[in-house]
Image (cartoon, rainbow, N blue to C red):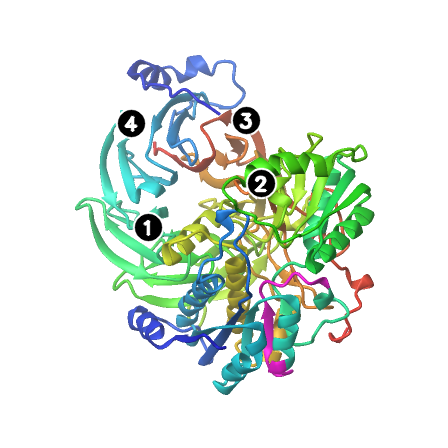
Amino acid sequence: MLQSLIVISVYCLVFTFGFFPFAKIQAAMALDVTVGVLRVDYPELAPVSRYDRKPEDLGFAGAGLGNEDNQTTGSFLGHAFSMETATSAPGDLEEAVGSFIGNGLKIIVVIGRGEDVLKVADLAGPDVLVFNASAPETSLRDRDCRANVLHVAPSRVMLADALAQFLVWKKWPRWFLVEGSNPRDVKLAEAYRRAAKKFGARIVEERVFEDTGGSRRADSGHVLVQRQIPVFTQEADEHDVIVAADESDVFALYLPFHAWTPRPVAGSGGLRPVTFHAAHEAWGATQFQRRFEKQSGRYIQPEDYNAWVALRVIGEAVTRAQSDDPQILKDYILSDAFELAAFKGQKVTFRAWNGQMRQPVLLTDSKITVSVSPQDGYLHHRSPLDSLGIDEAESACEAFNN
Amino acid sequence: MMRHLRKFSPKSSLFGRMAPALLLAGSLLVPGPAVANKVFVSNERGNTVTVVDSATWEQIAEFPAGNRPRGIGISPDGKHLYVCASDDDTIKVFDTDTYEFLWSLPSGPDPELFVISPDGSTLYVSNEDDNLVTVVDTAKKTVVAEVPVGVEPEGMAVSPDVRFVVNTSETTNMAHFIATEDYQIKHNVLVDQRPRYARFTNDGKTLYVSSEIGGTVSVIDMLGEAGPELVKKIGFEVAGVQPEWLQPVGMRITSDNKWLFVALGPANRVAVIDAASNEVVRYILVGQRVWQLEFTPGEQYLLTTNGNSNDITVIDVAEQEAVKSIQVGQQPWGVVVAPD
């Protein structure tokens, strides 16, 4: 069911224009761009950690800040930006997308799982430009790619490659891979196997942690965890690091300190590869964090950052290409001329062969930025950022004309 | 890292001023009669200002300067030091002789950088979190105007004829030209990603804007037909350095308008640009994460703040070579030199 449809446009614009003494750049065209932001909500258990609870405005808050940034910039150019937000259950996507299309929207940002991003893209049709702001599904950038979808969120293989580079740089090549039993955990484990092979690490031991649906946050949970995890991890082959593939959030956070052998944990627990996190300060990110917190009253989450980037990609393309035509915007975004500053130390750009945004990946222990990949020494003829994820030569994506 | 604050001692300052020739008898650095100028460096993480003597290149004092001091400037008469205490939402004013805190100026929230009008009467401050430029009367200690600009305003420059104040907005990617007569924006010029800093030639004909993430310096002709006009973008290239680490930030131009110096941030180099051709002629290796630049009076030396190596580098301007580095506080951000 379409739960809500909020239009945050008119008074923001009045406010912006009413206060801005704007002097237009010569010959700027007046444009009016409305972006639809659709979040697909799933029935989910409470997270292992309270810190990972999903706020009501997840993603929308980041999109809202991006929309405000676009409005401010647009006010100097005669470009008006607005945003419509909607949440939907996976079964009601047709209604949600239909409502956006009915309102004349030509650009949609989706926060949802891979299969639903595809559904939205196909429902919206080729004339609508869709931004994937959360799904890490590698196949969406590969054999299942769509010409009308650009991926702001990093793929599983990009995240896995980012971590693998760091572990190899550390000279920790022997991995003990623990994967969950749900389909997305299996896919993530596959991304880690691929990364190990790509960067010369070895998986010396593999185990599956079955999701038996047990209670995860019982009051005495740690008592059992403290007894069970050592047993689960004992007698593994000699390893340098435990890599956890647990996208379902079932066990990875329990591995540090509890594993049989004292080894660092990385992946879904311990050192995690992320698109962004609320403690990141380098490259001007402090001021971005402050602006976000002032606006939303909470810390930023990866979905918010991705939605902000998506809105800024749209805004930047409108500013530079002087158009609101989705095809013209897409062509500009995929061109060499496009670049965007996104608080990750270097400009983000897009891969013309599959619509994936090139970006550094942050490695965090959930308190600080421990490192940022690509690591020093991983070279690539085009950009070191292309050492992360699917490269042009190995891409099975055929929807992009190149 | 802990650092003991050096207490100011009038005796050491006097010594520094009275006896530079004695101290420098064996130094190759300063030819001829040296005038000692105080160099003030804001330390963003250390919450202090470090004072260095430009004759001896010794640190002579370090004093608390509020929370997260960044932008730093000095009154034309050399008496007052202005420091943006960003996390205190204020500009603190210090006595340059005694380092005593005198008073605060209203700056608007999160002041990052400012420029001072040539007569010292006005500060133009960028407020990073609130998309504003605040105009402050230094004598009355009041806010004269607040000018809404683009997202994340940073770089500030005032044209030599004081007709325009320029602000660069880092997320909007524009240089905004604000008329000083009515504080209205008259022109906007789009530049590359994350414009950090703006600087006029002293004839006012050219404005340079550095774009950190875009990796370019935009050359803007102030005498364009329809107002300021982007005429060129200067790029950078250093063998062995990834292009994405060539991030232009602080800039200074010699007063004869011949040489433009550009700090390249994490590339740890200062680029030297021939301002006639707008071509890079040389890269000078300095400390890590080089941020802002300032000349000594007379332009014999150029000083650079190096945020990650916690030092400043002294560049011989004529030789275009680094000659010395001096440890300062934690994460040095800005630098200003007292006038003669």
Disc 1 packing (10 Å; few <14; some 14–19; many ≥20): many
Q: Nearer the viewer, residue B195 or A97?
A: A97
Which residue is found at the position 57% from the left and 44% from the top?
A: B264
Residues at discs 1 and 3 both on one chain = yes
Kindly state the secondary structure of the residue where label 2 is placed. loop
Q: Position of residue A58 (x, y in %)?
A: 48, 61
Residues at discs 4 and 2 both on one chain = no
The reply to whether dot 3 and dot 4 touch (C-beta < 8 Å) is no
**Label at residue B99:** 4
Amino acid type indicated by mark 1:
Val
In the rendered image, which residue does mark 3 sit on?
Answer: B324
Disc 4 packing (10 Å; few <14; some 14–19; many ≥20): some
Circle 4 or circle 2, nearest the eye: 2
Kindly state the secondary structure of the residue where label 1 is placed. strand
**Label at residue B125:** 1
Stretch of the chain drawn in magenta: A123-138
Give the alpha-carbon distance from disc 1 to disc 3, as whole Å: 32 Å
Any part of residue A284 in sight? no
In the rendered image, which residue does mark 2 sit on?
Answer: A365
Q: Which chain does tag 3 point to?
A: B
